[in-house]
Image (cartoon, rainbow, N blue to C red):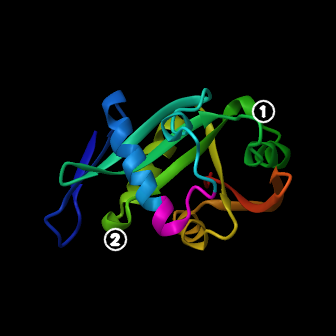
């Protein structure tokens, strides 16, 4: 677990592995984020299962003053993931050596405490420790998330149109962590 004080602030925040008992809090925070920001774009029928895909390697939660306020996951490439293929084409690295950062969100009330950056640092460190290169995708309309990734040094691989349903076509920006 990592724990730190924000400079000039006595607020305690930490990032730790997600435990099974955290899932309810994660779904609650996800619902707040969805209502505030529209993420995820399509609310899942089973949000707990959405946070725990079969391809999941590991996941973490962020706490602020002992409350779960954020989440991130690390997964193997799955159907529909575009960023691993783009990184593989660009570098010649097998998609088996790539991990997908996903399900990143921070409660609206907890923003401004570098929680998103802390979650990203943890997930990138884990991917690298496993010998995997982290990539991700984000809907192009989520400019705040894209700005975070770019501030953290992630490289834009490209923007791709995806057909999410017969009636829904979405542009996603694909990123790879800096080398």
User: Mark 1 or mark 2: which is in front?
Assistant: 2
The image quadrant where one finds the N terminus is top left
Q: Residue at x 74, y 43 (%)?
A: 81
Decide which of 169, 71 is in the foreground and name it.
Answer: 169
Decide which of 36, 87 is in the foreground and name it.
Answer: 36
Quadrant assignment, res 178 = bottom right
Residue 67 position, x and y percent, is: 23, 50
Secondary element type, mark 2:
loop
How many discs appear? 2
- Magenta residue check for 40: yes
Q: CA distance from mark 1 to mark 2?
A: 37 Å
Q: Residue at x 36, y 64 (%)?
A: 114
> Residue beneath label 2, please?
112
- Magenta residue check for 172: no
Task: Report whether 103 appears left or right of 165.
Answer: left
Q: Which mark is residue 24?
A: none
Disc 1 + disc 2, Cβ < 8 Å: no
Residue segment shown in magenta: 34-41
Residue 72 position, x and y percent, is: 47, 46
Q: Is residue 71 above or below residue 161?
A: above
Q: Is residue 130 visible?
A: no
Q: Residue at x 58, y 32 (%)?
A: 53
Task: Report whether 169 appears left or right of 142.
Answer: right
> Residue beneath label 1, please?
94
Ranked by sequence position, the earlier of labels 1 and 2 is 1
Task: Report whether 92 appears left or right of 25.
Answer: right
Task: Report whether 43 appears left or right of 169.
Answer: left
Q: Is residue 176 visible?
A: yes
Residue 36 position, x and y percent, is: 46, 68
Q: Residue at x 18, y 54 (%)?
A: 65
User: Dot 1, how many residues are within 10 Å of its Cα: few (below 14), some (14-19), or many (20+)?
Assistant: few
């Amino acid at each position: 677990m990592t724990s730190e004080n924000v400079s000039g602030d006595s607020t305690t925040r930490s990032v730790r592995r997600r435990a099974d008992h955290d899932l309810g809090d994660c779904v609650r925070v996800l619902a707040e984020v969805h209502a505030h920001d529209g993420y995820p774009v399509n609310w899942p029928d089973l949000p707990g299962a959405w946070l725990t895909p079969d391809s999941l390697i590991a996941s973490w939660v962020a706490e602020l003053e002992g409350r779960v306020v954020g989440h991130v996951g690390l997964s193997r490439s799955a159907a529909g993931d575009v960023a691993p293929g783009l990184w593989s084409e660009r570098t010649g690295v097998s998609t088996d050596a790539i991990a997908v950062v996903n399900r990143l969100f921070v409660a609206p009330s907890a923003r401004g405490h570098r929680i998103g950056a802390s979650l990203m640092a943890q997930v990138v460190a884990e991917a690298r420790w496993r010998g995997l290169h982290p990539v991700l995708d984000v809907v192009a309309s989520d400019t705040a998330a894209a700005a975070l990734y770019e501030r953290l040094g992630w490289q834009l691989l490209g923007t791709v149109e995806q057909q999410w349903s017969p009636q829904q076509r979405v542009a996603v920006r694909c990123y790879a962590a800096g080398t």
